[in-house]
Amino acid sequence: MKNNVAKIPFVNLNLQHQQIQTQLQQVMQTVLDTGDFILGAKLQEFETIFANLSGVEYGIGVASGTDAIALGLQACNIGSGDEVILPANTFVATLIGVLRAGAKPLLVDCKPETALIDLEAAARVITPNTKAIIPVHLYGQMVSPTELLDFANTYKLLIFEDAAQAHLASREGYHAGSVGIAAAFSFYPSKNLGALGDGGMLVTKDADVAQKMLRLRNYGASSKYYHTEPGTNSRLDTLQAAILLEKLPYLPQWNSDRYQAAQQYNLELNSVALPGINPIQNHSQSGHVYHLYVIRVDANSSIQRSCLQEKMTAAGIQTGIHYPIPCHLQPAFTNLGYQPGDFPHAEKLSQQILSLPMYPGLTHSQVKAVVLEIMHSVSPQKNKLLYI
Ligand SMILES: *Cc1c(COP(=O)(O)O)cnc(C)c1O
């Protein structure tokens, strides 16, 4: 029976690259011919278009999403002596960005239903030194912009969005990237908009932040060989920008493919109604761009998460865990002084979440096969009948 189950990868980038292969080859040849490899015309074009699509004026391409956070915070004048609030259940790059900017991270717990930062918990850690909050639009779902803006107004904090998983996401009429003073995007290959290598961008509505970011990514130079601050070398390659520019027109369709697949997962999971197995909730309707589709395997389930994952793997279905260890329990950050038990929702989620295959081009029958395999893994007896 298991041999009949199609192999379903966790992501499949070949599908999108085959779709536009000729265009990609042409544009790579164009960059090769023009030779403007660093800070070239295609970079500027991509920066402007992507920033505008995200609802703001300025875009500054950098070498990675991590650099967009680290340098972006610096561009917002956040650094030594400042505290920055962020969720414990994010990819470590959010935390690394704060530390690299020289600020002190204040980790907080998340809401169990959405896995998004808990703003009530955030309010409890604020001190006179707290300068900013980094909402992470995790899995492709924005943190509520109206709640964020209320929060930031009440406590006089800056909002710096980590939108690395939320290209073109929206909620309550806001685009990801347009809520705060600035936002960081990543173009890591498997992100909703991915380069053929590393890349990132800071987008901002603030002209001063944009100017400082332009300097920081280019050795701190305000003009050639004149350096006003100790910046670094972190530019998005013209080649990668040209590739991203070719992909960009397809992004709305690719996001909508993800959304459709997610809707189908919801439907299929709902119809099999397995106790203790539920998707992370979407509170933002069609504005969710489903970088990841994540289910939760809780104590009411007859199977443990690890066991389910093993069975899925054996059946040829790749899954992931985003993320298996919350930031505060990573060995690299023990010096921050956090303990197990500090963020119970984040910790519980890290033990219960499972990311299912999700990418543009994932078919209806593949989604069906994934849910059927979950059902089979959870209750082999019940399912045997269905297979007869
Ligand atoms: C991918 C990611 C980053 C880091 O981006 P890189 O381009 O890999 O440096 C930061 N935050 C989140 C939430 C991410 O998913």
Image (cartoon, rainbow, N blue to C red):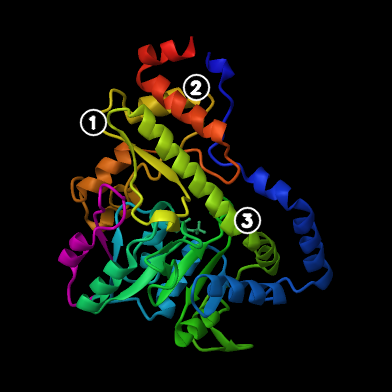
Query: Residue sitting at 69 percent across and 69 percent down?
Result: 238
Decide which of 116, 127 is in the foreground and name it: 116
Query: Cβ(mark 3) to ligand 1 < 8 Å?
Result: no
Residue 184 in the image, given as x and y percentages of width and height: 46, 67
Q: Which mark is residue 197?
A: 3
- Vertical position of residue 27 compared to residue 214: above or below: above
Q: Element under label 1? A: loop
Residue 3 in the image, given as x and y percentages of width and height: 57, 16
Decide which of 115, 175 is in the foreground and name it: 175
Query: Residue sitting at 72 percent across and 46 percent down?
Result: 18
Marks 3 and 1, the one that precedes in the sequence: 3
**110 magenta-colored:** yes
Residue 234 makes an appearance in the image? no
Q: Which residue is mark 2?
A: 314
- Residue mark closest to the camera, 2 vs 1: 1
Q: Which residue is mark 1?
A: 299
Decide which of 34, 352 is in the foreground and name it: 352
The amino acid at mark 3 is: Gly
Location of residue 141 (image quadrant): bottom left
- Vertical position of residue 118 compared to residue 44: above or below: above
Location of residue 138 (image quadrant): bottom left
